Structures are given as structure tokens and as C-alpha cells.
Amino acid sequence: MKYDLSILIPARNEMFTARTVQDIIEKKRGKTEIIVGMDGQWSNPGLEDHPDVRILYLSQPIGQRAMTNRLCRLSKAKYVMKIDAHCAFDEGFDVKLMADMQGDWTVVPIMKNLHAFDWVCSDGHRRYQGPSGPCQECGKQTTRDILWRAKPSPNSTSYRFDKTLKFQYFGEYKAKQEGDLVETMSLQGSCFMLTRDKYWELNICDEQAGSWGHQGTEVAIKTWLSGGRVIVNKKTWYAHMFRTQGGDFGFPWPAHESQIEKTRQHFRDTFLEDKWPLAKRKLQWLTDKFDAPDWHDTNRGIIYYTDNQLMLKIAHKVQKQLLKISREKNIPIVSASLKPMSKMGKNIVVKGQRGHLTMFRQILAALEASDTEIIFFCEHDVLYHPSHFDFRPSKRDAFYYNTNVWKVRYEDGHALWVNNCRQVSGICVYKETAIKHYQERIAHVEKKGRFERNMGFEPGTHGRIEWQNKYASESWLSQYPNIDIRHEKNLTPNRWSPNEFRNKKNTEGWKETTVDKIPGWDNLEQVINSFK
């Protein structure tokens, strides 16, 4: 028979493998096969022969991920579903899931709790499933009474992971779910279904991560970041038996914390640092999409500073973009201006004339008024892409510069790119570091009585000044570029030819284009044209 679905069951020393397989045989209604992997040990009790059941036995255990991969290699079906060896299912669960399935989805039914058995003594006293032992009421010996039924509640449909990538239930999001096909940020891991092609394309069971642990997080993140969706199909359900009480009702195989931590660290290094090579989206996109509570990063803040002399068409567009980002990403704005600006977050009016020292004082005033730990510097003539604010600095004593920036001449939309374009408008830094530097910078200018060009503007990028507090600088590239609008009142001069630069290092990577060819922006050409 040509099967539509292969159910993959990696099992190591599991007592309910046979009961799980029996349940699937009774409940499936489509062209569904079951492939069981006996990882180092035969099931006890054994499995009954059935034409839709295949068994792979390995004398030495290789671990859940490796075994699941071995099982998937045996499948020729369009879809594969990995399940734990202690689950029960709704009647027709397989055809219900396949009926709504899409090619880039990973799907799971509603998850119930499986009431697999009770401990019962000869006097009829019952104790809910857990470790073996005498009756707690009369002390007599107990035997296991198999019930194998789904409990009426809970009915779990919403999951997430925390900032360490550890699994969590997500009740806040469940309240927002509507309809029969609902999105979930993550998965519990005991059951998931996807196409066999996607299983291999996304390396769903990465054996480099370790034999077991964090599988729901791995599967969900890979699905979402690759451009797919993780869906709970509420038209059907499965029930999972949770073993959380230890003893002989814990894991039936060694689960060393050191190995689990190694797996956690592998995924942290891969996903928290956005190093997964198949990702089309950043992890921040996913955490923002679901507004996950402990990912709701109130540590990020924007400081916006302006001399209030910029052409209003440009200024208003930049402000509107920043305010939109502030709302959507929950990043508060502190603005420092020479005139009152009641709509730009917490506003501080700095007295003084337009100039370098005044700008430094504005930056310091905004920094000191900010309540956040990480600061993005934002200038009044730069259009910031939302992806700029997904960055997190790893070092507290360094200035980070986003070098993904195009300089665009507003008169005609001509655009220029150079490598390693480190500008103050692209800074992300820890507040305490920035405050120390700008306090020292202001004191230096006040002592000299004027701004000296050899000081430069970009902290940490040179050693021409013997600062008391020395900081390094590093760079990053956001997913999409920022747009530095060049006009007649820029504080730094506009140069549109390599010949205008004495230091040719500043011309490395020189590229010229037009604004309509810059990626990541909708209607950017129209926006630039509106400034004329």
C-alpha cells in the first residue's frame, strides 16, 4: 500500500509502546502506517503483527533524534508524524489532520492528558497513576489497572519558550486564539506532523544537538524561521502521558542533566544568536509576533535628538516611522530637542544653539532620562528599518554600529553604499557606557573651548584622543538597511565621489544605485520623492 502518513515512534524501554500502537491502529482512518524504533531494547509487552506496522530494532541505543531520523528514512509517505510512545488519539485523527494540512505547516492536535492507569489494591482503593507502591489507605499491594483514556481537561493549544528556550505553556495567547486552526509560538514536542520533504529540508531532528530534549522548541523555531507556520488543529486531539513524579514513573532511560544542558546550549547558540543557516526570519520576529511575556523586552530604548531645523517633510516622516516602531516593538522613546516636542515620547528641551557641543549635551540629557538599559541612537534625518531594533549588544563596554545603511540624496534619490559605515546614527550601546563617554566628551570640549575635528563623532572607532574611559567598537548588519537622508543641513559634509575622500579606507565597497533598488522598504522611492 502507498501510505499518506507515516507515524514515527522512537521508543527506548517504554512500557506503553504496544498500547500506543494498538490505539493508533484502532483510531486511524486513512492510509497511515506506524514505524516503531526499538532503541536498544525490545518492547515489553511486545507488539502484535499488523500489516500497517513496521519495527526497526537496534541492539545499541542511539537516542531519540537519531532514531527518529532512521525511522523517517524508511518512510515513503507524503507526511510524517513523530509521537512519544505513551499517547492515545481521537478517532480519525489522521484524516482530520491531513484534510487541512499545508506544505509549509507543522501541525499538532489539541493536547490532552492521558489517564493511562490507576494503582488498585484488593480492597478497591484507587490511586492515580504514578510510582508503584503499596496502597496509601490500607497498605496492601497494588496492581496497575489500565484505563487509557483522555482526561476532559486541560485542552492545550498554546505553547511558547522562554528566554532560555525552555518550554512553557502560553495561557495568555490561548485566550486570543479563534477558530479551529490556530497558531502557536512553540510545541510541547510529544507529537508533531509535517511533510516528509520539510522534515529533511529543515533538519527537524538535528543529531548535533544531542539525543533528547527541547524538541518542541527546535521544531517550532525551525518551522517559523524558515517561513512556515506552526498550527494547532482543534478539530482533533491526542492525549499524552506525563511522567513527572520520578521513581519508576519517571524517564525509563538515563536523562543526565549535563546532556540536557548541552542540548540547551546548542540551541541557544544556534537560535538566540540567529545563526541557523536556513532562517528567513530573525528570532526576534517570532517573539515579537506572539508578544511573549518574558521576551517583551523593556530593556531597549530609543534616544532621538534634533536641532529642530530640518525640513519638516523629512522630520515628520522620520518621527512617524520611529513612533510606529516604538508602538509595535514596545521600545520607549526619549527625545532631546531645542524646541518642545510633546509627541516624541519623553521630551527634554535643551537650551543652546545648534552645534556639536549642544548635540553632545542633547545626547547625554536623553541618555540620563532614559529608563532602559540598552539604547539605540536615532537621528532626525534617518529612516530606520524595524529590523535595526532587533539587535542586542553582547558586550557592555563596546559601541555597536549598524553598518547596513544607504546614504540617499533626497533631491534625486541617488543612493550610495560603503562598507563599514560606522555613524553615530547607527549606534546601539549599553546606557551606562554611553553616559560615561558623553560625560567625558562634553568635559573635553568644554575644557578645550571648542570641538576639535580629531575627536571625531563615533566613540570607540579610533585612538586619537586619550579618553579616560576607553571603549571598543564593533559592527553588525541589520536584516534590512537604514536610509540616511542627505540634505543641505547635514552636520557632516556630503561626498558623492571617492575622490573627495583623503582616507580611501572610507570608500571600500563603494556602490551607487537608485532608491528604488534598495531592498526591504515599501514605496521608498515615493517617500523620497515626497521630500522635494
Image (tube, rainbow, N blue to C red):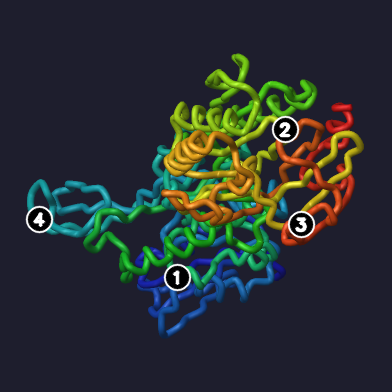
Whole-percent x, y for residue 270 in the image = 53, 61
Lower position in the chain sequence, tag 1 or tag 4? 4
Separation (CA) of disc 2 from disc 3: 25 Å
- Report helix, strand or loop for mark 2: loop
Which numbered dot is residue 381? Answer: 2
Lower position in the chain sequence, tag 4 or tag 2? 4
> Which residue does the image show at 25% across and 48% down from the upper left?
128
Lower position in the chain sequence, tag 2 or tag 3? 2
Which quadrant of the rendered structure holds the C terminus? top right
Whole-percent x, y for residue 359 in the image = 59, 31
Separation (CA) of disc 3 from disc 1: 54 Å
Closer-to-camera residue (418/318): 418
Bin the neighbour count of mark 3 within 10 Å (Cα to Cα): few under 14, some 14-19, many 20 and up: few
Q: Which residue is mark 3?
A: 502
Lower position in the chain sequence, tag 3 or tag 1? 1
Bin the neighbour count of mark 1 within 10 Å (Cα to Cα): few under 14, some 14-19, many 20 and up: many
Tell me which amino acid carries mark 3: Arg
Q: Which residue is mark 1?
A: 210
State left or right for residue 400 relative to residue 164. right
- Tell me, yes or no, if residue 63 can be seen here: yes
